[in-house]
Structure formats: structure tokens, C-alpha cells
Image: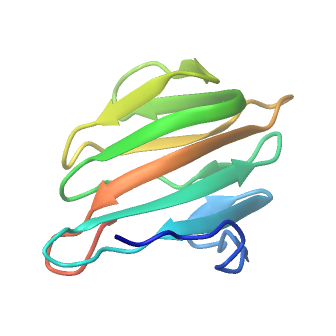
């Protein structure tokens, strides 16, 4: 058993290749084989969001605070709020982030395939 103590891993800004606006990523845990699951807490300032992307084995988002949006390619944008859980199937192109006026934080859980958890 392992305990990942809060604050034991440094926060990092979201890079401009994967995000727009102000984003802070707090790593929560990395995969411990045979598991392929990793997790992070991502905080989006108002108006910040991810770029369009996919996950080879899907992604689960647990919204912990604020209000945000998520959009699947070819579909309407949907609002997400604290307490909601979003399951994104493998290979589905999407983006997610804060609304234009309210920040949003979520925990992102995803598995890696051949060492990659996002495309």
C-alpha cells in the first residue's frame, strides 16, 4: 500500500501545446504496474480549456469544484458542475475546461496504452 501525501508532487502550469488560458496541474499518482492508471487534479481559470484530444483507453473526469464545459467532436458543448462524473470513451475526440466566467477543477483519471495516456 502507498499513500501519496498531499503536496508531495509539485504543481505545474498547463503547457500551451495542450491548454489555452491559465491551467494548473497537480499530479496525484502515476501507474504502478501492472496498473496503467494515472490521476491528476486540474484547475482551470475562467476561460481556460484543453486542446482537442483523445485518450487511447478513455478518461474519467470527476468535477470537484466550479462550473465547466465539455464537448465531443460533432456534438454540442455541455455544462458540467461539481459532483458530476464524466466518462469519455476511448478514442473520442473532445475538450474540457472552465466556463468563460467561472473556474473549474476536476480530477482526471486515465490509463496508458503503450506508455501514452493522451493523443
- Give x and y (percent) for residue 92: 25, 42
Q: Residue at x 65, y 29 (%)?
A: 68
Residue 41, image x and y in percent? 60, 55
How many marks on residues?
A: 0
Tell me if residue 32 comes above or below residue 26 in the rendering. Answer: below
Q: Position of residue 82 (x, y in %)?
A: 64, 24
The image shows residue 76 at horizontal and vertical percentages of 45, 18
Color scheme of the displayed model: rainbow
Q: Residue at x 64, y 34 (%)?
A: 64
Q: Is residue 112 left or right of residue 79?
A: left
Q: Nearer the viewer, residue 24 or 49?
A: 24
Say which quadrant the C terminus sits in: bottom left
- Please, is residue 67 above or below residue 48 in the view? above
Residue at 65% of width from left, 66% of height from top? 26
* Quarter occupied by residue 94: top left
| Residue 91 appears left or right of 87 | left
**Residue at the far front in the pictured view:** 1
User: Is residue 19 found left or right of 22 in the rendered image?
Assistant: left
Kindly give the residue lying farthest to the right in the view shown.
101
Q: Residue at x 53, y 60 (%)?
A: 40
Depth order, front residue of 113/70: 113
- Left or right side of 66 for 108: left
Q: Quadrant of the N terminus?
A: bottom left
Amino acid at each position: 500500500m502507498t499513500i501519496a501525501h498531499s503536496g508531495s508532487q509539485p504543481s505545474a502550469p498547463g503547457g500551451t501545446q495542450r491548454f489555452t488560458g491559465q491551467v494548473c496541474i497537480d499530479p496525484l499518482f502515476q501507474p504502478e504496474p501492472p496498473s496503467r492508471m494515472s490521476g491528476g487534479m486540474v484547475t482551470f481559470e475562467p476561460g481556460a480549456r484543453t486542446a482537442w484530444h483523445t485518450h487511447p483507453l478513455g478518461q474519467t473526469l470527476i468535477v470537484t469544484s466550479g462550473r465547466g464545459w465539455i464537448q465531443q467532436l460533432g456534438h454540442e458543448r455541455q455544462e458540467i458542475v461539481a459532483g458530476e462524473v464524466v466518462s469519455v470513451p476511448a478514442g473520442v475526440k473532445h475538450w474540457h475546461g472552465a466556463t468563460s466566467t467561472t473556474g473549474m477543477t476536476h480530477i482526471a483519471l486515465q490509463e496508458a496504452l503503450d506508455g501514452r495516456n493522451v493523443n
